[in-house]
Image: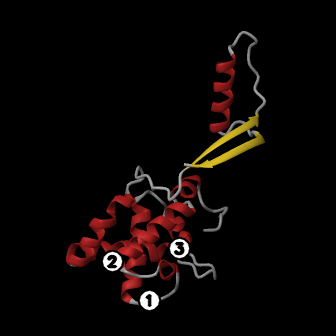
Amino acid sequence: MKPNKHMGPVDKILLSRAIVDTIIAKVAASYDVNPSAIRSRRRYRQVAEARQMVMHLLVERGATLMGTARALTDQHGNGRDHGTVIHARRKILNLIDSCKQTRRRWNEVKHLADPEFGFHATRHYRVFMAANVDVLADEDLPREEVERRATIRVFAGRATPKMVDYQMEKI
């Protein structure tokens, strides 16, 4: 998904590329379709229903209608609008009530709608970083407290570190 100046900060987090790609991959596996078909313009029933399920899951996670529509825009700019997302949600909710197969698929993937759900990484890395961060502090403070305050400033977005060195190892 390309960064979009019209997306709010919540959508930028909820619709990160990794999250959207993981949801698409899991739904595609459930529907036995190619993940790239979900972002395409194909209207085959199975592909369309899988796409609608992805839209429903993204909105259930807390994404906005327009953010969800933009997240499913393909590389050719074939986008969708909020009306498509509204229709997709209605359609999936009706199918969950009326179709056993869709209800089974929903039960397989509904955990993805929980914003607290953590996606499992395919590789685990440990990264050691050394960075320069300017912090004003009292002379009396111990070194650990100054380091803690610098770390908090970086993670809160109030300081931008200048990267000095890093090492990465596969675990």
- In this rendering, is residue 77 above or below 132? below
* First along the sequence among labels 3 and 1: 1
Q: Which residue is the site of mark 2?
A: 91
In the displayed structure image, the side of residue 122 where residue 130 appears, left or right: right
User: Residue 158, image x and y in percent?
Assistant: 69, 36
Nearer the observer, 26 or 52: 26
In the displayed structure image, the side of residue 70 where residue 25 appears, left or right: left
User: Residue 74, image x and y in percent?
Assistant: 58, 78
Q: Is residue 87 visible?
A: no
| Mark 2 residue type | Lys
State if disc 2 and disc 3 touch (CB < 8 Å): no
User: Residue 154, image x and y in percent?
Assistant: 67, 36
* First along the sequence among labels 3 and 2: 3
| Mark 1 residue type | Arg
Of helix, strand and loop, which one carries label 3? loop
- In this rendering, is residue 112 above or below 142? below
Label 1 packing within 10 angstroms: few (<14), some (14-19), many (20+): few
Q: Which residue is the site of mark 1?
A: 43
State if disc 1 and disc 3 touch (CB < 8 Å): no
Total marks placed: 3
